[in-house]
Image: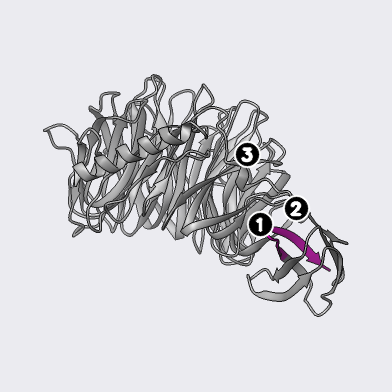
Amino acid sequence: MINSIKRLTIFGIILANIYSASAQSSLQWAVASEGAGYSWVHITRMRTDSIGNILTSGYFTGDITLDPVNQTGQLSNDGSNGAAIFFCKRDSLGNLLSLFTPDGVGDKMATDFELDAEENIWRGGYFDGSIDMDPSAEEYLLTSMGREDFFLAKYSPVDSLLWAGQFGGTLSAYGGQIAIDSLGFIYFGGDFSGSIDLDPGPEVYEIHATGSDGFVCKLDQEGNFINAWQFEAPGFVGIDAMEIDAEGNLWCGGSFNQSVDFDPGEGVFILESTGYSNNYLVKLNPEGNFITAVRFGGEADMFVKKFVFNSEGSVLVTGNFNYRADFDPGPDEYILNTNGFVDCYILNLNKDGDFNWALNIGGEELDTGLDIIVDKADNIYVTGHFYLTADLNPGADSCMMQSAGESDGFLLKLDSTGRFQWASHLSSTLNISGANLILLKDGSILESGYFCNTADFDPGEASFLLPVSGDTEMFIRKLKPDFNVNIANIEKSVSANIFPNPNNGLVNIEVNEPSLCRIFDASGGLVSYSHLNNGGNYLNLSQLKRGFYAVQIILSNHTLTKKMMIQ
């Protein structure tokens, strides 16, 4: 199988070279795993060290080779005990340098890892059963006390175990987010039910959950317990992302329902959800004292995936939401409606948590942002995936993409104010998505994710194909600085205007060629279908309810999607 994969990989390289004569490649390189049968592998986190090595963590089942070109990085897990986890290091060209797969019994998840100032690696996650945290021939075995326990371990730059700790309780545990401040203190967070001991040493610091509560504990560089803070919730509160801002404050973000007290001290600061799950951000100082917390959301589910800070200290959040949500955490409203079922959102709040702006992108199905980064000019990059079709331009114009299979990936660039710059299509004949982004010093971009069938990893006019031999493979690719997007997919030589907008159901649509018009409500249902003539067209839509609608205009060689509000 390895020989056949190598032949296909070489074919991808030859194909890219053939196209480079007439089409500029935007790809520096791409690597992927090689599985077998129903194997699958996902990367959960990606970082780089000071010399450009690429570190990843992930989980898998089945038989997988992480570096099939060099025939190294073999993984094996029959799945009888759930998923296994791995930690690996690659050089700046994607060649595998080292691999560590903790042994043990039971299901495991590698959630997060961070590098400290000395480039020691702090790795965290959760497990049930047992897990051996020592990569050497020695054993450092942790055994869960409840359904799942958390693990946190410190490794040297050459992957020698320096310290490992366990946070265990009576029931379930989820998460394992890590943040390290400029003084070297470690913050570790997640959510739990029942009770949990947050001191990984011989002493006990036990807290008890009201429902499914969130927690953050603070440790020193030796893994010694300093303090811990709890967010109490009769329903649930999940910590899905944690970051340290430029002033050394800790931000946590995630989802919650019912009511949560986000002040972990003696004070009380309660936020209440307006639907099943809303999103939140909470800001604490380095001592764990409450600064502020904000809520945004609607009546349906929504999720925080990642957030990042720009040069002004504003926080930029991406995730997804369903149907309709208010993204202004203050007394005013800023309502966004999805284009269909679930949309990706990007939210900008200032350093005090006040609303700056918000936008959404998507189509008729499930679309989400999974990671977000900013460059020196505060331009914004978001990676994620969309199903079937999606409009990647959040402005009045459109940038329509259509997946080659079920779901495709996207890489979106916005300026610092949220204005559309470009969108890049990551295409597979089944499913593919980016999940992690890193912007390197030279302006090139590292992206990792997964794919389920043959995929093209060059976002330009050239092609670079990598195949799939298991069920789901992982990939890492490096894109050139200021890489070229295949502009043919997003340039438009046609136009359409809708006015007035908003309107009372009586609307004019102006096009510059005969076309078809389809109008969809917020749930993705088709509510109107009509033929448009070249020029102005008057439509009476007064029978439709008040709200947001997606107007799809199908021309001879292009499809435009516009947003319309009936009030």
Residue furthest bottom in the image: 543
Q: Secondary structure at mark 3?
A: strand
Q: In the picture provided, is 538 more to the left or to the right than 63?
A: right
Tell me residue 3's x, y (percent).
19, 42
Judging from the image, the colouring scheme is one colour
Asked if residue 456 can be seen in this view, the reply is yes
Which comes sooner in the sequence, label 1 or label 3?
Answer: 3
* Residue 252 drawn above or below residue 310: below
115 versus 174 height, above or below:
above
Residue, disc 3: 315
Proximity of marks 1 and 3: CB atoms separated by less than 8 Å: no
Few, some or many C-alpha atoms within 10 Å of disc 3 (few <14, some 14-19, many ≥20)?
Answer: many
| Kind of residue indicated by mark 2 | Val
Task: Please report whichever mark, 3 or 2, sits nearer to the chain's N-terminal start.
Answer: 3
The magenta stretch is 550-567
Spatial separation of the CA atoms under disc 3 and disc 2: 36 Å
Tell me the kind of residue under disc 1: Asn
Front position among marks 1 and 3: 1
Image quarter (top left, top right, bottom left or bottom right) of the C terminus: bottom right
Callout 1 touching callout 2 (CB < 8 Å): yes
Image x and y of residue 490, in percent: 64, 47
Answer with mark 1 or mark 2, whichever residue precedes in sequence. 2
Q: Residues within 10 Å of mark 1 (few under 14, many from 20)?
A: few
- Residue picked out by circle 2: 494
* Residue with the mark numbered 1: 557
